[in-house]
Image: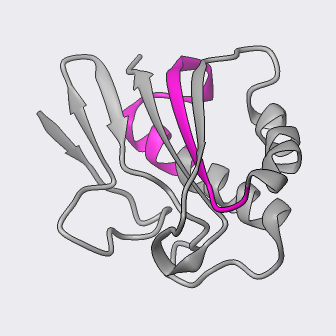
Amino acid sequence: MRIVSTDKAPAAIGPYSQGIIVNNMFYSSGQIPLTPEGTIVSGGVVEQTHQVFQNLKAVLEEAGASFESVVKATVFIKNMDDFATINEVYGEYFSVHKPARSCVEVARLPKDVLLEIEVIALVK
């Protein structure tokens, strides 16, 4: 196993890693809309979703992977009423390549953010 860590995404806020590589697979921790400095991005669900994807991009790149090599994404959202908006932003990052995905509404997320996304990707 190899731990993935980059300062281009927020540091872990608990006893976990930004991600782990096992063999040729990368497993990310859930990314929330924190800036690399650790502050919640201002704005609504659109801005928060873009920040989550910027964080995912950073950890994927550090792992030697990319959005094109993601095989599974799990999306946790605070309010299912935001699904269409989040899905629209999600489609900007997964327009041609469409990984398997689960999406669930949850009662609460860390720091009361609106969404969290984790991915599993093939390392190049």
Q: Quadrant of residue 97?
A: top right
- In this view, the residue in front, 86 or 78, is 78
Part of the protein shown in magenta = 57-79
| Quarter of the rendering occupied by the C terminus | top left
Q: Position of residue 5 (x, y in %)?
A: 31, 55
**Could you say which quadrant of the image residue 115 lies in?**
bottom right
> Considering the image in quadrants, where does the N terminus appear?
top left
Residue 26: x percent and y percent?
A: 33, 30
What residue sits 88% from the left and 40% below the top? 88
Magenta-colored stretch includes residue 123: no
From the viewer's perspective, tell me whether residue 86 is left or right of residue 41: right
Residue 118 vertical placement versus 67 (above, below): below
Residue at position x 17%, y 67% from top?
A: 15
In the rendered image, the vertical position of residue 99 relative to residue 104, given as above or below: above
Q: Position of residue 94 (x, y in %)?
A: 74, 27
Q: Looking at the image, is 113 positioned above or below residue 78?
A: below
Instruction: State the scheme by which the image is colored.
Output: one colour
Q: At x 52% / y 72%, what residue is drawn?
A: 36
Q: Is residue 99 above or below residue 46?
A: above
Viewer-proximal residue among 67 and 78? 78
Relative depth, front residue between 69 and 77: 77
Q: Residue furthest front?
A: 107
Q: Is residue 27 left or right of residue 72?
A: left
Image mark count? 0
Does the segment drawn in magenta span residue 67?
yes
Horizontally, is 30 left or right of 4 in the view?
Answer: right
Could you tell me residue 114's position as x and y percent? 67, 66
Would you say 88 lies left or right of 120 here? right
